[in-house]
Image (cartoon, rainbow, N blue to C red):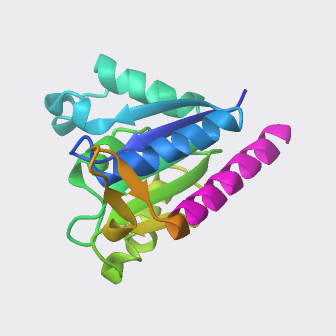
Amino acid sequence: MAKAVIINGSPTSGSRLTAIMELAERNLTEAGFEVNRIDVAQMPPEDLIHTKFESEHIVKANGLVAEADAVIVASPVYKASYTGVLKTFLDLIPEKGLAGKIILPLFVGGSLAHLLAIDYSLKPVLSSIGARHILGGVYAVDAQVARTEEGGFDIAEVLRERLESALAELAEETRLRMRD
C-alpha cells in the first residue's frame, strides 16, 4: 500500500486549509493510500525552535516522512510566503529526507498576488532537502473556501476540480514510481 503524509504548516486549526487537507486525505484514502498528517503547530514549540532533532515528536514526524511515498506540503500564505511554523519543521527534515518522494504543495492565500509563493519560496527549500519530483501544486484563494453556517466549509467547484486533478496526478505518479 502506498503511503502519503500531509505536512500541515498552518498555525491555526480549523482554517480554510483544513478543508483542503481533508479533501486530499479523503481522495488519497479512496485511492488506496495510507494517509498520515503532521500538524506542525501541535508539536512542542521548544523542539522546533531549538532544533531538537532527537525529540520524540521530531523523530516520529520524520519517520512518517521517511516512510511516505508521497508528501503533501500544505500552508497558508502569510507575507508572500509559507508560514514560519512550516519552515521550522522543514529545517528539521534530514538533508536528503525528501529524496525519492512525489511532492504536492497546497497553499491558500488571501489573493492571487502571491500565486508564485509555491515556486519562489517553497520549491527551493524542498529541493535543498532532496525533493526532485515536485508537482505543480495548487494555490487556492480564501474566497474559494467559504465557511458554512454549520461550521464547515464549502470548496468552490473550480478549486475542487483543480485539487482532484492534482491529487489524481500525485496518486498516479506515486504508483508509477513504486513500480520502478
Residue shown at 50% from the left, 34% from the top: 65
Q: Main secondary structure of the magenta part?
A: helix
Identify which residue, 105 or 133, lies in the foreground.
105
Which residue ends up furthest to the right in the rendered image? 179
Residue shown at 46% from the left, 42% from the top: 22
Task: Tell whether 65 sits left or right of 152.
Answer: right
The N terminus: image quadrant? top right
x and y percentages locating residue 117 in the rendered image: 37, 71
Residue span colored magenta: 160-179
Q: Is residue 110 visible?
A: yes
- Quarter-wise, where is residue 134 in the image? bottom right
Residue shown at 71% from the left, 32% from the top: 32
Q: Is 10 included in the stretch rendered in magenta?
A: no
x and y percentages locating residue 49 in the rendered image: 16, 38
Task: Tell whether 178 sits left or right of 107.
Answer: right
Q: Is residue 170 above or below residue 46?
A: below
Task: Tell whether 38 sits left or right of 164.
Answer: left
Q: Is residue 69 visible?
A: no
- Quarter-wise, where is residue 144 in the image? bottom left
Residue shown at 29% from the left, 64% from the top: 77
Identify which residue, 24 or 87, lies in the foreground.
24
x and y percentages locating residue 141 in the rendered image: 36, 70
User: How many callouts does the rendering have?
Assistant: 0
Task: Tell whether 23 sits left or right of 19.
Answer: right
x and y percentages locating residue 180 in the rendered image: 85, 42
Q: Is 161 included in the stretch rendered in magenta?
A: yes
Which residue ends up furthest to the front in the rendered image? 149
Q: Is residue 40 above or below residue 128?
A: above
Which residue ends up furthest to the bottom in the rendered image? 113
